[in-house]
Image (spheres, coloured by chain):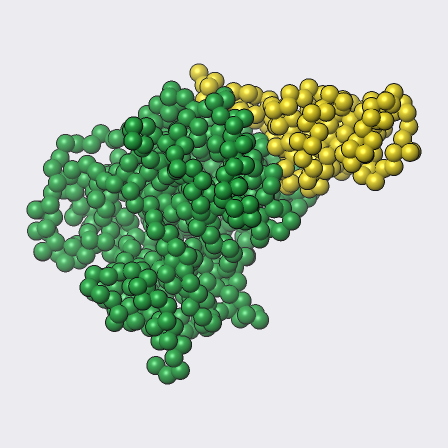
Amino acid sequence: MYVYDQYDQNIVDDRVKQFRDQTRRYLAGELGEAEFRPLRLQNGLYIQRFAPMLRIAVPYGLMSSTQVRMLAKIARDYDKGYAHISTRQNVQFNWPDLENVPQILAELATVQMHAIQTSGNCIRNTTTDQFAGVAKDEVVDPRPWCEIIRQWSTFHPEFSHLPRKFKIAVNGAVSDRAAIEVHDIGLEAVKNAAGELGFRVSVGGGLGRTPVVGSFINEFLPWQHLITYLDAILRVYNRYGRRDNKYKARIKILVKALTPEVFSERVNAEWAHLKDGPSTLTEAEIQRVAAHFTDPAYRELNDFSGELAELDAQHPGFARWRQRNTFAHKKPGYVAVTLSLKPTGVAPGDVTDKQLDVIADLADRYSFKEVRNSHNQNIILADVEQSRLFELWGELRDNGFATPNIGLLTDIICCPGGDFCSLANAKSLPIAEAIQRRFDDLDYLFDIGNLDLNISGCMNACGHHHVGHIGILGVDKKGQEFYQVSLGGSAGRDASLAQILGPSFAQEDMADVIEKIINVYVEQRNEEESFLDTYRRIGVDLFKERVYAANN
Amino acid sequence: MQRIIKNGQLIDETWHLLPKDAAFDSLPNCDDIIVPLGLWVDHGPALKARDGGLGVWLDAGDEIEEIADQLDNFQVIALNFPAFTDGRHSSTAYLLRQRYGYKGEVRAIGDVLRDQLFAMQRCGFDAFALREDQDAESALLAFSEFSEVYQASSDQTLPLFRRRG
């Protein structure tokens, strides 16, 4: 993974000093609340229901075991022993004291971590495929490009007060595991017929109140021009994006108002001034950054298929876990393993300090001292030897990471909701738990198969409910918490936005509602047909009828 | 007398900033004045004929393209921040310096606060009329908050990747 040199370290160290002084001035009354607010937000610090919430940046989800241990230490020393993996591959702490935040940042800086631009109206953490660098279907490793974008976006002087937040995602594989089409900018690394590398560029995607699937405005941007082209997009947005209404301030509204064609013309007109200028990327820089993302010291191994099949036969639990929680690796004899942070009864994405220490230890022993966070709020050991899979499974079971539910209905994406977040209209965690409890039969879960169930506690959509196969949105009706259900969303390459089923439901009915929806699917599906495909084939009517029928 | 920051130092203000609704008839002949864009558009030739210094100020929604071919008439171009969180004129300052080659003073006016100064001077501002409640002395510290930067902008035309040792 990327390792800071003195330049990178100086910038992060300077930031620690700067924020320490800003916090000091705020606490001393020299800096007003309104002036401090954007400063703390651009450092990931929210004032929440009980205490500030601090969001630590995990650039494109990648962490070393040393960094994971630091997060464990911070959870222990400054929080209540918990951390939360967010849907942007970041890590959040829900209980730090404001006074301690400068010190937390100083400790993070010692392991090359920070909280820069994890909130606020600026360019946020760039996200990517959690299987970057190891996926079999990868065309281009997105990580060096993510790092180049991270550096470009860090304290960009011109784009630090945008109309609204700005999210970039990069995908380099055949499947899109980074949901690029629902980002402000989505970049797909591709190769042209001549084998040259470039990017397909999507703009104006996003969730939130007005979910939109992005529009591709450039089918092949040669890699040299990535930064100048991003500068051009951001400059057009910074100058012309709406600032009069925060709900219409995202770039998607501008793209829609202008039409993607006109927006793209504006970008090209701006880019014409920048193209081939000093920010044009160099082969040397790409090589410098890419050198941090070369393969680890893999051993020359053969696949362990026969032995694993035998173990499967002897241990059905292992077979089930292997089916759901492992992911094929590009190297023979290796496999990527997802640690489920979604056991029933635990807030999705939550880990304790002790678990973080265990994860760091497992990374050291099984996976070249690195882990990844996924936007699905799980943690991945990307480079595990297949011959050690059974042994690892045992350790994961001992530590609560082996719930065999990756990609299944109980692998719920869920924001912290009204239990923690001051923006939320409704709680989300109890809904997730009620659904997990209802679907506690593993055989049935496996039979239902791939299903993305996403829950957001408000229309800011941190839980990505618009792109859930089943999406749940908490709404406030005259002070009461209700839940709106939508169907048919997808964050994949065939991205689509979910359709609202109808009137919202009370909290206590939610598990029943989901069960009825699943029953319709099970009755209607053709053999091997996924929930999403069935929905796309039969439409919403049967689901609606069942869920809203008077007596059933 | 109000003081402003110019090139990283506090100096006495010598310019008169005219309000948006300033009438042309009441203008003094000799003072150094910064006129709103509308006044320049309506009375450009007469303003040029005055003896005093001339500057123009743009509100956040005004586009620099409107006067891009007239910049040598102005010793000062002031850019107004209705709120410090409105970043539009960060792009304007960049364009003034990098695209239109403007060498005069680019001044930030309005809701100009210490904690935005570092980024603003990077974009091309060299003068800052701070909001009244700001401590101008301590604001000067903002210019040295970062020892290194990643991106190219007006202060540093090469990105770090072309300068790394």
In the image, B48 versus A59, the foreground residue is B48
Q: Residue at x 52, y 41 (%)?
A: A263
Which residue corresponds to the image point at 8% horizontal and 46% vertical from the top-left? A307
Tell me where residue A444 sits by quadrant.
bottom left
Q: Which residue corresponds to the image point at 45% horizontal and 40% vertical from the top-left?
A: A217
**Viewer-closest of A287 and A229:** A229
Q: Colour of chain A?
A: green
Of residue A215 and residue A503, the one placed in the foreground of this image is A215
Judge whether residue A528 can be spotted in this image.
yes
Which residue in the rendered view is the most extreme toward the bottom? A551
Q: Is residue B84 left or right of residue A493?
A: right
> Residue A179 location, x and y as percent?
38, 47
**Residue B9 can be seen, yes or no:** no
Is A35 on the left-hand or right-hand side of A288? right
Of residues A61 and A213, the one drawn nearer to the viewer in this rendering: A213
Count of numbered labels shown in the rendering: 0
B61 is higher (above) or lower (below) than A87: above
Q: Looking at the picture, does residue B72 appear above or below residue A445?
A: above
- At x 19%, y 51%, the residue is A322
Q: Quadrant of the C terminus of chain B?
A: top left
| Quadrant occupied by the N terminus of chain B | top right
Residue B39 is drawn in which quadrant?
Answer: top right
x and y percentages locating residue A413 in the rendered image: 38, 56
Q: Give the left or right position of residue A13, taking residue A28 as reference.
A: left
Q: Colour of chain B?
A: yellow
What is the quadrant of residue A193 in the picture?
top left
Query: Measured from the top left, where is residue B3 in percent x and y?
Result: 79, 27
Q: Position of residue B55 (x, y in %)?
A: 78, 26
- Which residue sits furthest top? B165
